[in-house]
Image: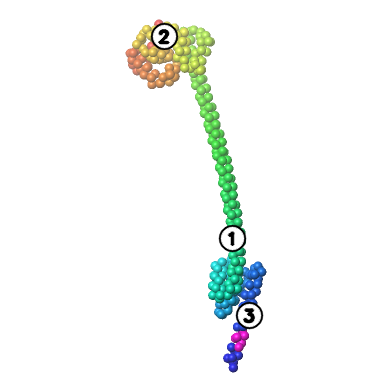
Amino acid sequence: MAFALICLLAACNVKSDMDNMELTVLEIEGKFSRGEDVSQDTSIFQARRYFNLTDDAEMKTLSALYSGCVYWQRNDFDSAMSALNEAIVLARSSEDIKLMEKVQTTISALNGDLDHSENMITVFLRRRKMLVIISLVLVAAVALVFFLLYRAAQKRATIAELNLSIAELQKESETLAETNRNNLIHKVMMIYKVFLIGENKDIDKASFQKLKSCVCGREAGNAYDAIFEEYNKVYPNVVQRIKDNQPAFTESEFKVCVLSMMPFSVKEVADILDVSSAMIGKARTNIRKKLGMTEARGSIEEFVMELSKE
C-alpha cells in the first residue's frame, strides 16, 4: 500500500516537471518568434537535459533547437552549432514535417541574423582597414615632411659651415697676401737702398713704382724683366762685365748672378724666375764651380760686387 502511494506521488511529480519544462520551451519559443532577446533564458538548458531522458521527440527537438538559439545570442557559437545540429538530426528522425519546417525556419532566422552580422562585420572591417591605411599614409606623410625638414636644415647647416670655412679661408688668404705684399715691398725698398748706396744715384719715382708693381702687383710674371731693367739703369756696366767675364754662363746662371746682388732668398729668386728652389741651388753650385770657388772661400755676391766697382 505504501509502495503504491510512493509510485503515485512520483508519477504526479514527473507530470508536474514535464509540464514545467514544456512551458519553459514554449515561452522561449514565443519570445524568439517575436524577435525578443532570449540570451538570458538559460532555463532552456535544463529543459533540454530533461527531455533528453524522455521519449518526447518534439520536445527533445524544440529544447535542443532553442538551446541553440540561446547559445547563439550569447555568442557561444560552438555550443550553438552542436545544439542546432542535434535539433536537425532529431527533426529528421521524427519524420514530422511541421517540426522539420519549424527547425528550418528558426535556423534560417539565425542565418539571416548571421548574414546581417557578417555584413556589419564586413563593413566595420572595411572601415577599419581604410582608417588603418589612412593612418599609415598620414604617418608616412608626417615622417616624410619631418625628414625633408631635417634634410633641409642639415643642408642649410652644411652650407653655413662651408660659407664660414670659405670666409675664414678668404680672410687667411687675404692676410697672407697682405703679409707677402708687405714683405715684397720691404724687399723692393731694400733693393733701392742697395742701388742708392752702390752708385749714390737718385732713382726717379716712376722707376720705383714700375719695379714695385712688377714685383708685387699683377705684372709679377715679368718680375725679372722689370728688375733687370732697373738694375741695368743703376749698374749699366755690370751686366756686360758679367757676360764678358764669364761667357760660359748659361742664361739661367746669368740671371742668378744678376739677382745675387739683391736681398732675395733662394725661394724668392726661384719665384721670380718661375723655377724650383732646387734648380736655383744647382745653378748657384755651377756658378761657383765655373768661378773656381769653394765652400770656404768666395761668394757669388762678392764676385758681382767686384765687377760693379771696376
Secondary element at tag 2 = helix
State yes or no: discs 3 and 1 in contact (Cβ < 8 Å). no
Q: Is residue 12 magenta?
A: yes
Can residue 90 be seen at all in this image of the molecule? no
Residue count near mark 1 (Cα–Cα under 10 Å), binned few <14, some 14–19, many ≥20:
few
Q: Position of residue 305 (x, y in %)?
A: 41, 10
Between the residue at mark 2 and the residue at mark 3, the CA separation in whole angstroms equals: 150 Å
Q: Position of residue 171 (x, y in %)?
A: 54, 27
Between the residue at mark 2 and the residue at mark 1, the CA separation in whole angstroms equals: 114 Å
> Residue shown at 60%/56% (left/top)?
123
Q: Which mark is residue 239?
A: 2
Q: Identify residue type, mark 3.
A: Asp
Residue count near mark 3 (Cα–Cα under 10 Å), binned few <14, some 14–19, many ≥20:
few
The N terminus: image quadrant:
bottom right
The C terminus: image quadrant:
top left
Ranked by sequence position, the earlier of labels 2 and 3 is 3
Q: Identify residue type, mark 1.
A: Glu
Q: Relative to 234, does residue 41 appear above or below in the rendering?
A: below
Residue carrying label 1 = 118
Residue carrying label 3 = 19
